Image (cartoon, rainbow, N blue to C red):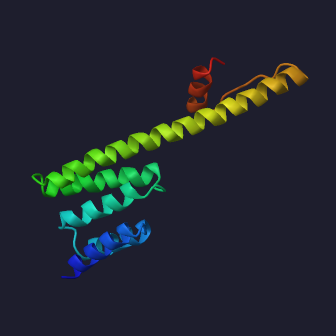
Amino acid sequence: MLISLLLNQSAVYCKLFHFKEAMRCCDDALRLTQKSAEVYYRRSQAATYNRGSSIEQLEAAKRDIDQAISMRPGEEKYKKHKGVLEGVVEAKLQTESKAVDWVVRCALKRLERAQKASGAIELKPEKPLELKILKKYGI
């Protein structure tokens, strides 16, 4: 009975766009039982529909929905939600990638201005990701 109450409360919080509270309800429900696929599903929903969720939170939501599907493989709403979640993750990755590209372009413009103003500056990337970004922009 308490699990149902927490799940309903979580659903209401999601409808009110209070996603952190919704996730807290699900976390409380999981402390009581880890045998309810619906709890994992609801927690995944709360993270998915929260536009402020980070990539890490969305990855945790993927694990939650996978857990729910493994517990109840025939449940179509879980599979449908997984598709929605994958779309949200892809959109979030594209948005973050565009933001990183913009920051890199701005930094490269500043670097070019600095090179013109004071002579050549040698650019030495410290991390493989930095090297990959610089190669992407032809540096």
* Location of residue 70 with respect to 26 vertically, above or below: above
Q: Is residue 127 visible?
A: no
Q: Residue 61 versus residue 130: which sits nearer the camera?
A: 61
**Left or right: where 45 falls relative to 100:** left
Q: Is residue 34 visible?
A: yes
Identify which residue is drawn at 22% across, 68% down.
34
**Left or right: where 126 falls relative to 97:** right
**Left or right: where 68 falls relative to 58:** left
Q: Residue 122 versus residue 72: which sits nearer the camera?
A: 72
Q: Residue 68 versus residue 121: which sits nearer the camera?
A: 68
Q: State which quadrant residue 38 falls in.
A: bottom left
Farthest residue to the front: give it: 15
* Location of residue 64 with respect to 23 vertically, above or below: above
Identify which residue is drawn at 19% across, 63% down.
37
Q: Position of residue 55 (x, y in %)?
A: 45, 48
Identify which residue is drawn at 46% across, 40% down.
93
* Location of residue 71 with respect to 129 vertically, above or below: below
Q: Position of residue 129 (x, y in %)?
A: 56, 32
* Location of residue 59 with respect to 24 vertically, above or below: above
**Can you say which quadrant of the picture contains the N terminus?**
bottom left
Farthest residue to the left: give it: 74
Q: Position of residue 18 (x, y in %)?
A: 43, 69
Q: Position of residue 46 (x, y in %)?
A: 36, 62
Count of numbered circles on the image: 0
Q: State which quadrant residue 91 falls in.
A: top left
